[in-house]
Image (cartoon, helix red, strand yellow):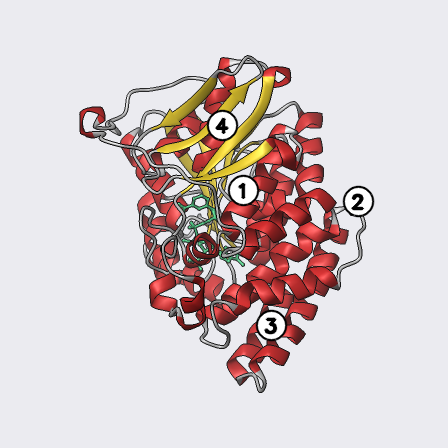
Amino acid sequence: MRRIAILGSTGSIGRSTLKVAESYPERFQIVSLAAGRNLDAASAQALRWKPRVVSVAAEPDAEILRSQLKSAGLGGIEIVHGSAGSVRVATHPEVDFVVSAIVGVAGLEATYEAVRAGKTVGLANKECLVVAGELITAEARKQGKPLLPIDSEHNAIHQCLRGGRMEEVRHIWLTASGGPFLKTPKSEFASITVQQALNHPTWKMGKRITIDSATLMNKGFEVIEACRLFQLSPRQVDVIVHPQSTIHSMVEFVDGSILAQFSVTDMRLPILYALTYPDRIESDLRFPVMDLRHLDFCPPDMGKFPCLRLAYEAAEAGGAETIALNAADEVAVATFLDGCIRFDEIPRIIERVLAATKTCQLESIKQVLQADAEARRVAGEHVEQLSGNPSPKAAGHFRNLAKGVI
Ligand SMILES: NC(=O)c1ccc[n+]([C@@H]2O[C@H](COP(=O)([O-])OP(=O)(O)OC[C@H]3O[C@@H](n4cnc5c(N)ncnc54)[C@H](OP(=O)(O)O)[C@@H]3O)[C@@H](O)[C@H]2O)c1
């Protein structure tokens, strides 16, 4: 029996994890759940799963949840809040497997503490590895526990690597759907609306990752994630556009053999793989191979999607640059979603923040969070410069982001 904590239980990955747990009640027990602001969903999950602990982002929500559960006869469930609450969920003594799926740097501390507590971690949250990959992977090695990728591309690479040894790998190919604007001329990028950008062609995901997929920053983060998870240099990680999202990624070995993984575009499959690793178990997630007609591939257009180029540059530099890359993107995407900046201004903000970032290596999570807060502050200034007179909503947003409230 796997005893599971879910960080980000109310999000897209969190809900898919609960669906997997629902399908295999004899294998998986939900011990603890961490949600953000969606109190209704957190409350419904607590009633359904009766975990030992539930965390929500804000203290007043924790109070409400506590009294709701008490009235339902579930007063024994421990209710906690904030980042300390997420850490409690991740490190509960009864937990042996943590699904890390809080979006953004908000998930960093709990994920790192889960690794430090010797839990096996299934990583959906890629931002953790982008900002603190060296610290997290070093700690996992020290604990002798695997970090199991849930991100579909890295999960595919993890599966393909079972076909050879690391020293036999020449390079890896991360496939990218290309997002909704693969065929949109760059001249139209300035007028792209939030609704258009949220319309991903192949995957249904949370808002941040959907916008990151539209700018190709998500693929850039994945390049950094792959370097850190599999100890590769950025030059060994190639991105290839594959609009059908059928092949989830490929590994090329030194003898010229290429192994690819393909399956349905359903995140339950990589979640199930991580939860049951090193075994494979029966599922109904079958790919209709007889319906397969063609697979298209083309190189990414770095001129049209500068976020991917910026991510490769940050990957080469490492340390503070990858922290700034993520922080600037988090601020830029949030303000784009709020309607305060244009779609084509997202990479401009990130480029300016990176230009203002001094190269240095960070040696603790505290230092990482300090560098993150500073990069957010600088990003906030650039948003204000670009948007002229920022709305009060945007100004509040930077303050909240800097405090890690959102
Ligand atoms: N969705 C996918 O298919 C997919 C694929 C690969 C990788 N990923 C990665 O997985 C992560 C989650 O993605 P998603 O699509 O599931 O995002 P999502 O649907 O937006 O869900 C995000 C989750 O994080 C929670 N959260 C946000 N801020 C929080 C905070 N301060 N404290 C505690 N919880 C907080 C949210 O809670 P509330 O909703 O309650 O506010 C929600 O449960 C991201 O890092 C993404 O890049 C996702």
From the viewer's side, name the closer residue of 228 and 7. 228
At which x and y percent is residue 85? 56, 52
Residue 285 visible, this orientation: yes
Q: Which mark is residue 184?
A: none
Q: Which mark is residue 157?
A: 4
Disc 3 marks which residue? 398
The reply to whether dot 1 and dot 4 touch (C-beta < 8 Å) is: no
Disc 1 marks which residue? 222
Query: Residue 289 lies in what quarter of the image?
Result: top left
Mark 1 or 4, nearer chain start = 4
Q: CA distance from mark 3 to mark 1?
A: 25 Å
Sort mark 4 into few (<14), some (14-19) or many (20+) by Cα contacts within 10 Å.
many
Which residue type does callout 1 highlight? Answer: Glu
Mark 3 or 1, nearer chain start = 1
Q: CA distance from mark 2 to mark 1?
A: 22 Å
Task: Find the residue positioned furthest to the left.
Answer: 290
Secondary structure of the residue carrying tag 4 is helix
Mark 2 or 1, nearer chain start = 1
